[in-house]
Image: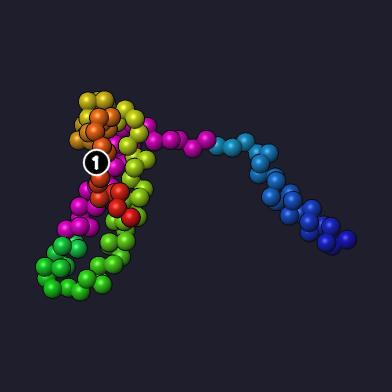
Amino acid sequence: MWKRAIVLSGALLALGPAGLPQEKTAAFSGPNAIAARQAGMDMSLLTIRSIEGAMKAGGEAKNQGFPAAVLAKWAKALPPLFPAGTAKGETSVETQALPPTLAGPRRRTLFDIN
């Protein structure tokens, strides 16, 4: 009896939310994506300068592991913030992002390095 009640309760908990109305999450619009990547780039610059300052002051490289890991994590999260239509000249928002080129080999960036 208890086993059946537990299984039924588990099924209701697992399947119940599927029947409820789901709230749609907003995707990044062009201006929001541009603002997010510009803010992230500003924070990246601060982190890079912090690491650079610590190294010039004679700090140990191992103490900069966390900031370096955060930059690597950001580099992997950054590409979706460049949706189509958000390059320079493609939007009214001020941006320095260049549109992708179809001619020639793809340029390798720091974000491609794993």
Is 42 contained in the magenta span?
A: yes
Residue plotted at (29% across, 53% down): 113
Q: Where is residue 87 in the image (x, y as percent from the top left)?
A: 26, 31
Q: In this view, does 18 lie above or below 6?
A: above
Residue corresponding to mark 1: 107
Dominant secondary structure (helix, strand or loop) of the stretch shown in magenta: helix
Which residue is found at the position 65% from the left and 39% from the top?
A: 20
- Residue 93 visible to the viewer: no
**Residue range corresponding to the magenta coloring:** 24-49
Query: Horizontal and vertical percent for residue 68?
Result: 27, 61
Location of the N terminus by quadrant is: bottom right
Give neighbour class at mark 1: few <14, some 14-19, many 20+ (Cα, 10 Å).
few
Secondary structure of the residue carrying tag 1 is: loop
Q: Residue at x 25, y 30 (%)?
A: 103
Q: Can you give x and y, in whole percent of width and height, for residue 61 in the image? A: 22, 71
| Residue 96 covered by magenta stretch | no
The answer to whether residue 99 is left or right of residue 19 is: left
Q: In which quarter of the image is the C terminus?
A: bottom left
User: Outermost residue, right direction?
Assistant: 1
- Amino acid type at mark 1: Arg
Direction from residue 22 to residue 85 in the image, left or right: left
